[in-house]
Image: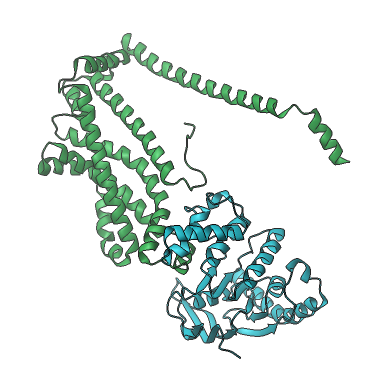
Amino acid sequence: MDQPAIDLRGVSKRFLTPSGGVYTALRDLSLAVAPGEFCALVGPTGSGKSTTLALISGLEPPSEGEVRVLGRPVAGVDTRIGYVFQSDAVFPWKSVLDNVAAGPRYRGASNREARERAQDWIARVGLSGFEDRYPHQLSGGMRKRVALAQTLINSPEVLLMDEPFSALDVQTRSLMENELLELWAASSASVVFVTHDLEEAIALADRVFVLTAGPATVKGNYLVDLPRPRNVSEIRFQPRFDQIYQEIWSDLRDEVLVSYERQKRVGAA
Amino acid sequence: MSVRSALARLDAAPPRAQVLNRRAEAVRKRRLTIQGLRLLVLVLWLGSWELTTRVGLVDKFFFGMPSGILERLWTWVTEGTALGPLWEQVLVTMEETVLGFLVGSVLGIVLGILLGRNRLLADVLSPYIKAANSIPRVVLGALFAISLGLDLKSKVATASILVFFVVFFNAFQGVREVDRNLLANARILGADNRRLTTEVIIPSALSWIAASLHISFGLALVGAVVGELFGATEGVGELIYNAKNSFDANGVFAGMALLAVVALAAESLITALENRLIKWRPNPVTDVAI
């Protein structure tokens, strides 16, 4: 195998809780993502999926272990990485155009160049004519498009996505998923896509990692050998999709149950 | 079919233009009613005041009377005050207020953002700031009158110290409440520390700061007038002080009316400024119906 684009080796992450305790989010987690590969990370809620992304992005340092991205150990935020957040993270005080142009401007492009490139990306995500709107004037799906354009304009070599479409309605969601696959196919980025929706993970990804209930470690690693290009709203009806789903679900179910039992206990206590 | 019945109902409904007209009519009527009732309240209030003082139910020596207040205002406008022309007094008070407001706001915003960004500085200074905030700051006006003299400086100082704390606490809090996701996003997009401050933290804190500007302009006016009460040679506060010394209740009320007009004018200016500063907000405070 080539050198992986993303390589986590024996990574642990602990946080201090406000009450002075120690919370272990990740324990001895190892995973590798090949260059250009689309990976999905699934696991029960609170299983440290977002923490994994934070470590890859350099927003958080690992407590133990090593995180390497594109052959280099991660030290701080890396400009070769793009990150689409779960909640709305577009700047509410910037127009669509200025939101999309933010990345190039921060990276030293002139104002004019940044705006021209932003215009191009706004057209690519289908928001032409909305350049001057503020985020609060857009629908949730449109705000996600802004977030995608804002991230992809920097042509990241590694794209991290944290449940980006979880707040969208079902129709908008499969539209956005197809658009994402198209945009990704036109790039050579490696993707780590976090979701708790196994169907979404299989429909999008080349490889699915199942995480255990926290502290998270990799429980299973499945290759999704469905043909590309895919249409996410149709691929779910293929027999092979079902087979893969069954296989992964048998692994995931146990973890979901563990996580559920634990929450019930916390709720009862 | 339900679609057909719905269509039939649409046909039966009055045309759209007619509906809109009727709605506009209702809105107009309501506005007229409110204006009328407002006028009524004013007439009742001033009328009962005038009447009770005129028949001697209330002593006009202590409480003044509306016609007397108007008369006093008229004399001030036409013949000038004991301190000089009226517009000069208003201008002096306005100058003190605006300067105090500017100095206090700028200091408050700068220090608020500085301390909001710097944990160590905030932790070191917080007990002193809390202590300073807990004393009734208007008494500092007395100190300023001694140390800075009876001219402009002492009033500006009193006004700005009142403004400073309000703006400071709002700016500080605004910086602290910045959405962590937005910060993370900006860092990923490549923003350095300076950019984080100018592109995320300040815009985000602006809505807090803008909210404080409303209150603080009023406080600036309080500061200027209190400063004048502690000792001055001109200004609306000094006018009021003089009226008080000569047991002229009408004069005190007339001064108050002047201050109210000034405050209302300033308030509308600040609302305009606020709407400009944070036009990205979902619900800008336009005209609240009060």
Q: Is residue B239 above or below residue A236?
A: above
* Residue occupying image coordinates x 73% and y 81%: A225
* Residue occupying image coordinates x 58% and y 69%: A162
Q: Is residue B269 above or below residue B18?
A: below
For the question of whether residue A101 can be seen, the reply is: yes
Give how far across and how far down residue B7 sits, in percent. Answer: 82, 35
Residue B70 lies in quadrant: top left
Quadrant for the N terminus of chain B, please.
top right
Q: Is residue B218 above or below residue A262?
A: above
* Residue occupying image coordinates x 50% and y 19%: B36
Chain letter for the part of the structure drawn in cyan: A
Q: Find chain B in the image and tell me its colour.
A: green
Looking at the image, residue B159 sits to the left or right of residue B47; the answer is left
Q: Nearer the viewer, residue B272 or A19?
A: B272
Give how far across and how far down residue B13 sits, in percent. Answer: 77, 29
Looking at the image, residue A101 sits to the left or right of residue B108; the answer is right
Give how far across and how far down residue B125 sits, in percent. Answer: 26, 61
Looking at the image, residue A119 sits to the left or right of residue A182; the answer is left
* Residue occupying image coordinates x 49% and y 64%: B181
